[in-house]
Amino acid sequence: MRTTASYIRITLFTIISAIFLMYVTSAEAPLQSLSQVWYWVILGTVILFMMAIEVCVAALQRVLYLSLDLEAQKRFDEKMALEKANQFKWFKETYKKLLGSKPIEEEHEIILDHNYDGILELDNKLPPWWLYGFYATILFGVIYLARFHVFGDYTQSEEYDTEVAIAKAEIEEWKKTAKDLVDVNTVTLLTEASDINAGKIIFNERCVACHKADGGGGIGPNLTDEYWILGGGIKNVFRTISEGGRDGKGMVPWKTELKPSEMAQVASYILGFQGTIPAEPKAAEGDIWIDPDASIEEEPVEQEAEIEATETTEEVLINADN
Ligand code: HEC
């Protein structure tokens, strides 16, 4: 029996299952790693199952119906016909009310008394759905006017600013949980004690064998001096840790064993060795590394200028003495 009700049941069931599936496959839910294909396979199976149930129930009903005697079948038919007539009564009535149109039988009440070559005009009332919608817009307009133009609640640009601020805060929040998005281009020197400590633990576990606990160096180079073979600064150090050193030197790429966030932590920890004095420092290797991004304060130049200035004053003084 393909009835409207059965279609509605299947549609509703499909929607509910889809929402349920979406829920269990969302982030942090048990099935979050379920692939898109499986999602549709499961949903499809569920729908087929639901249809099968509907078909079975309908068949069963049919069998029962045929097993009734004629008298009972007639009574059943009558009952069904009545039910069908009353089906969705509330919706039908509400829909009619919202349209507010007169039934054809009553149209003579609202016909206007002019006749243009047989064309007549009805004086229908405005449909209630439209009329109340219109009132609602008026109400909205009044409240809006009072709120924003009379009492001067926030302006559009303020609204924009708050939304941007909220979005920025959300991005920051998100970045905290997405630390592993860092790569060699975006990595920055971490300064939080928790990160440095995490870096220290990694260093002591995996790097001390070649670099020594104080960074003095052994098989690997000294990490405390300003000389770097592969470049200093957080980005180069991160890259060295991630990609490894020159072939055959012994510094392997760590990207397969450490997460990006961990490499950033250990890189930040290593850079804390700069300027410390290790127990047995290995001789410097590589070149002095100057950060190209460092702001051009170039103190030496200023000092030189100062010295020059003092010299000139001195000279002037000397000249004056003479
Ligand atoms: C098996 C020994 C070994 C281990 C373990 C090791 N390294 Fe190295 N490391 C080296 C060697 C050798 C070099 C020099 C590579 C070159 O010359 O190309 C090096 C170079 C480096 C450099 C670059 C130094 C410069 O002067 O440019 C950094 C930074 C570094 N290692 C960090 C680490 C970190 C962090 C770990 C632990 C996750 C680690 N290393 C583990 C042997 C090691």
Image (spheres, rainbow, N blue to C red):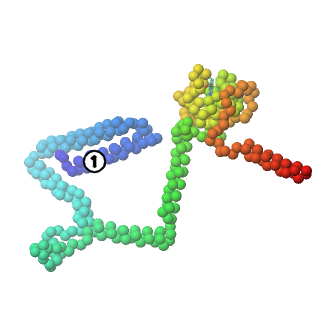
Q: Farthest residue to the bottom: give it.
A: 113
Q: Farthest residue to the top: give it.
A: 248
Q: Farthest residue to the right: give it.
A: 322
On screen, residue 264 above or below 123: above
Q: Secondary structure at mark 1?
A: helix
281 horizontally vs 139: left or right: right
Q: What residue lies at 69% left-to-right and 45% top-to-bottom?
A: 297
Q: Farthest residue to the left: give it.
A: 70
Q: Position of residue 279 (x, y in %)?
A: 75, 27
**Circle 1 crowding by C-alpha within 10 Å: few under 14, some 14–19, many from 20:** some
Q: Quadrant of ligand 1?
A: top right
Q: Nearer the viewer, residue 31 or 120?
A: 120
Q: Position of residue 96 (x, y in %)?
A: 23, 64
Q: What residue lies at 32% left-to-right and 37% top-to-bottom?
A: 41
239 horizontally vs 91: left or right: right
Q: What residue lies at 70% left-to-right and 29% top-to-bottom?
A: 214
**Looking at the rendering, which quadrant does residue 182 occupy?**
top right
**Looking at the rendering, which quadrant does residue 53 occupy?**
top left
Q: Is residue 199 visible?
A: no
Cβ(mark 1) to ligand 1 < 8 Å?
no
Q: Position of residue 122 (x, y in %)?
A: 18, 73
Q: Nearer the viewer, residue 19 or 123?
A: 123
On screen, residue 127 above or below 274: below
On screen, residue 166 above or below 64: below
Amino acid under disc 1: Thr
Q: Position of residue 295 (x, y in %)?
A: 65, 45
Q: What residue lies at 9% left-to-right and 50% top-to-bottom?
A: 71
Residue carrying label 1? 11
**Looking at the rendering, which quadrant does residue 284 occupy?**
top right
Q: Is residue 283 visible?
A: yes
